[in-house]
């Protein structure tokens, strides 16, 4: 019983990091939540744990997939090449060190806008395409965060279910 309690506490902390990681990409996000949820279900092994773990893992997977699909489709629709994305990611890493906390987001946006302007030579078109891409990325992050938070809530219900039925 003690191992189950310790494992549950550790998984709770991992889920906290995972939910934060969906918003702040330096931390591990959805993949950590998936591993933690399924690991918790395996560790406890009860029907309550497995049912909860599978439902919560499905929610995390839906959020992770929706975020990737939404962002990817928008980047294709705006015809933003991979080179611009690579420049934006590099600028995000630099921004992370230059501006604490928000530098990752500011660097990504500035890098994408600068790369698109250099490619298109039209500031208005670069602003529209990069703004649309950033909007889609933001919505994707919100969906992924919402699904991870919902999965964590389901997990809390599963913890109560497991320990009250054991």
Image (cartoon, rainbow, N blue to C red):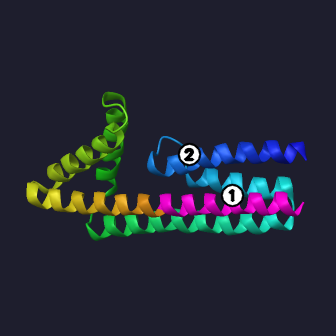
Relative to residue 123, is residue 111 depicted above or below?
above
| Nearest to N terminus: mark 1 or mark 2 | 2
What percent of the width, then of the height, locates residue 161?
79, 63
| Cβ atoms under marks 1 and 2 closer than 8 Å | no
Quadrant in which residue 38 is drawn: bottom right
Viewer can see residue 51: yes
- Residue at horizontal 36 percent and vertical 34 percent from the top: 96
Quadrant in which residue 10 is drawn: top right
What percent of the width, then of the height, locates residue 41?
79, 58
The mark found on residue 156 in the picture is: 1
Apparent side of residue 70 relative to residue 36 in the rendered image (left or right): left
- Residue that protrudes farthest toward the top in the picture: 98
Give the structural element (helix, strand or loop) at label 1.
helix
What percent of the width, then of the height, locates residue 119?
17, 53
The mark found on residue 28 in the picture is: 2
Viewer can see residue 49: no
- Residue at horizontal 48 percent and vertical 40 percent from the top: 26
Q: Quadrant of the C terminus?
A: bottom right
Apparent side of residue 23 relative to residue 123 in the rendered image (left or right): right
Apparent side of residue 51 relative to residue 129 in the rendered image (left or right): right
Answer few, some or many: residues within 10 Å of disc 1's Cα (few below 14, many 20 plus, some between 14 and 19).
some
Magenta stretch: give its range: 144-166
Instruction: Please tell me whether the stretch drawn in magenta is mainly helix, strand or loop.
Output: helix
Q: Nearer the viewer, mark 1 or mark 2?
A: 1
Answer few, some or many: residues within 10 Å of disc 2's Cα (few below 14, many 20 plus, some between 14 and 19).
some
Q: Is residue 18 magenta?
A: no
Count of number-bearing discs: 2
Relative to residue 75, is residue 5 depicted above or below?
above
What percent of the width, then of the height, locates residue 115?
22, 48
- Residue at horizontal 70 percent and vertical 62 percent from the top: 157
Apparent side of residue 31 relative to residue 79 in the rendered image (left or right): right
Give me the C-alpha separation between circle 1 and circle 2: 20 Å
């Amino acid at each position: 019983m003690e191992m189950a309690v310790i494992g549950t506490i550790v998984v709770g902390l991992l889920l906290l990091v995972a939910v934060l990681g969906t918003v702040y990409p330096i931390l591990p996000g959805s993949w950590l939540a998936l591993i933690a949820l399924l690991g918790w279900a395996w560790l406890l092994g009860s029907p309550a744990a497995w049912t909860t773990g599978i439902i919560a893992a499905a929610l995390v997977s839906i959020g992770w997939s929706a975020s990737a699909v939404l962002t990817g489709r928008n980047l294709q629709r705006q015809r933003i090449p991979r080179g611009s994305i690579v420049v934006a990611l590099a600028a995000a890493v630099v921004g992370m060190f230059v501006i604490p906390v928000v530098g990752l987001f500011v660097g990504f946006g500035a890098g994408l806008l600068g790369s698109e302007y250099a490619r298109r030579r039209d500031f208005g078109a670069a602003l529209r395409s990069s703004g649309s891409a950033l909007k889609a990325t933001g919505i994707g992050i919100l969906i992924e965060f919402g699904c991870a938070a919902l999965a964590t809530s389901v997990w809390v219900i599963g913890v109560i279910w497991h320990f009250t039925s054991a």
